Image (cartoon, rainbow, N blue to C red):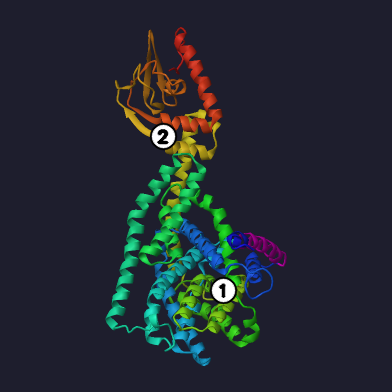
Amino acid sequence: MHQDMALVATVAIGFVLAAGFGYLADRLRLPPLVGYLVAGIMMGPFTPGFTADSALAAQLAEIGVILLMFGVGLHFSASDLIAVRGVAIPGAIGQIVLATLLGMGLCSLWGWSLGAGLVFGLCVSVASTVVLLKALEERNLVNSPNGRVAIGWLIIEDLAMVLTLVLLPIVAQVLGDPGADAAHQASASGTSVVLTIVLTLVKLGAFAVLAIVLGPRLVPWLLTLVARTGSRELFTLTVLAIALGIAFGSATIFGVSFALGAFFAGVVMSESHLSHRAAADSLPLQNAFSVLFFVSVGMLFNPMVVFEQPVAVLATVALITFGKSLIAFGFVLLLRYPVSMALTVGASLAQIGEFSFIVAGLGVSLGLLSQDGHDLILAGAILSITLNPAIFWAAGKLKTAMAGVMPGYGERKFATLNHALDVIKAKAEERESQQQLKKQQLLHMFPLFSQVNDHALEELLLLFRPASASPGDKVIRVGERGDAMYFISAGAAEVRLPGKAILLEAGSFFGEMALLSGGLRTADVIAVDFCQFLKLDRRDFNIFMTRHPRLRAAVSDMARERKRMNVAPDTGSPVAE
């Protein structure tokens, strides 16, 4: 196949095989992601037939991880992370340390070097956020307290891995083999190590400050600005630009991972009242590219390693699925949280994923880890991801079986955590309900807008600009060029025509005639009370009415009727101009 078509072939064949094997897995009562992994194996270099471009697949998978982590951030605010810090921070750090030591101990039995054992232990100590999210979504646990603790736990793991990726090359200079790349064998003093650590922490701190302080001010403003254009495709494009742009920029400038940058982009965007719309628009792309993530993982897997090193593969899988889970289970209980949370977190961590691949690849390039070790990690990832749904099922059964064990243990701390998360959730729901209430009030006050759908009402609320007037103020003047249409939300105004005056109260509107005709104002409108208006500027009026012809027709009909009434004898009608 022509090289220029490598990207098209990788995406097309990847989707076709993933759809086919995903459907087959579902029919066999297996999770679809098992089918996606099999599709990757079929496309990889270790099986006959078509071999996809693994480098392209890895980059496409990275986009999937970015979009998925962005979606997590949209639904997981900084307040959530702060709420679960009491269990997520000590638990994640302690679990990483103990799991790494277990991995190093296993490698010492195999006769591996200390550096290889360290890399192997780090790889098996962290779980995949992508896999966890899929598992939680399938069980409707993403917004549960246990699910939020599990997500927070993995976010802390991701932060720890960012620091690990920076420090590993320094460790390689001390532990690396003599034959390793000379670029990684330069002598490193203790001072340089400390400086590197400090610099990394400073970068992470600067990134966090920008994300927390500047982000919530800039991103919602930008989203609102774009949403006011009314262009759905431009809004979606802006959402993707923010997600990918922050992910790439944070990785380039601050040295954090794409996934972590995307997560913080989502957290920042969650502060906007348009976050639900951003989540809905990006969801199809999240789903599509997350499939490519699993396909790319499958492509890296050499099935022969299972037959060549069966004992080592079984030991690796056991360490990932049981050893690491038991460690997490123990830490949750030590921190005095309930057994049900400990089981959920333990099941969540019974797999490894994207960071493990990154660390393993870096370990190979630094001369710390052999290719056989890399293959073992991939085998452990594939098998643990495949087994993870069964482990979640077993955890659910254990919850039921252990319901009477240790009654009341950890319930007090769990209740406190649950209350904090409920407060955060209630605030988010209140913000959403306020937006819905605004739409309902708009429809109640101005029935004219029943001509448009819910999405258009949201757009209209963004287009409106508040205005006010005191008694006696002239809102519009005869002979002026029409620059806006006004909707009276409170107070009253009077239309002054030759020989008569027409009172307009809350729920009425005026100023549309000049906008529709392109001519000049034909009457004065004067406030007779303290008035509050919703003002729709000429440009916004023309764009919105063009997109909603039914509403434009209704406004035009009312304008014609008003014009007829304005030139007719006084009828006492409450609407005019």
Residue that mark 1 sits on = 404
* Lateral position of residue 384 relative to residue 69, left or right: right
* Residue at the front extreme of this rendering: 2
- Please state the horizontal and vertical placement of residue 517, each as a whole percent of the image: 46, 20
In the figure, is residue 310 to the left or right of 524? right
Residue, x 45% and y 53% (percent of image)? 241
Return the x and y of residue 476 as percentages of the image width and height: 35, 21
Point out the residue furthest to the left here: 191
Residue at image position (53%, 91%) is 110
Give the quadrant of the N terminus.
bottom right
Q: Position of residue 211 (x, y in %)?
A: 36, 58
Amino acid type at image mark 1:
Gly
Q: Circle 2 sits in a helix, a strand or a loop, which is it? A: loop
Within the image, what quadrant is residue 527 found in?
top left
**Marks 1 and 2 in Cβ contact (< 8 Å):** no
- Give, as a three-letter code, the residue at label 2: Phe
Q: Is residue 349 above or below residue 552?
A: below
Residue 354 drawn at (x, y percent): 51, 70
Residue segment shown in magenta: 10-28
Q: Residues within 10 Å of mark 1 (few under 14, many from 20)?
A: few
The residue carrying mark 2 is 464
In the displayed structure, 22 sits above or below 170; it is above
Asked if residue 389 lies left or right of residue 558, the reply is right
Image quarter in which the C terminus is found: top left
Q: Nearer the viewer, mark 1 or mark 2?
A: 2
Q: What is the spatial separation of the Cα atoms under label 1 and label 2, in whole angstroms?
A: 58 Å
Q: Which secondary structure type mostly characterizes the magenta part of the structure? A: helix
Q: Quadrant of residue 203?
A: bottom left
Rate crowding at label 2 as few (under 14), some (14 to 19) or many (20 or more) other CA atoms within 10 Å: some
Q: Earlier in the sequence, mark 1 or mark 2?
A: 1
Q: Is residue 64 magenta?
A: no
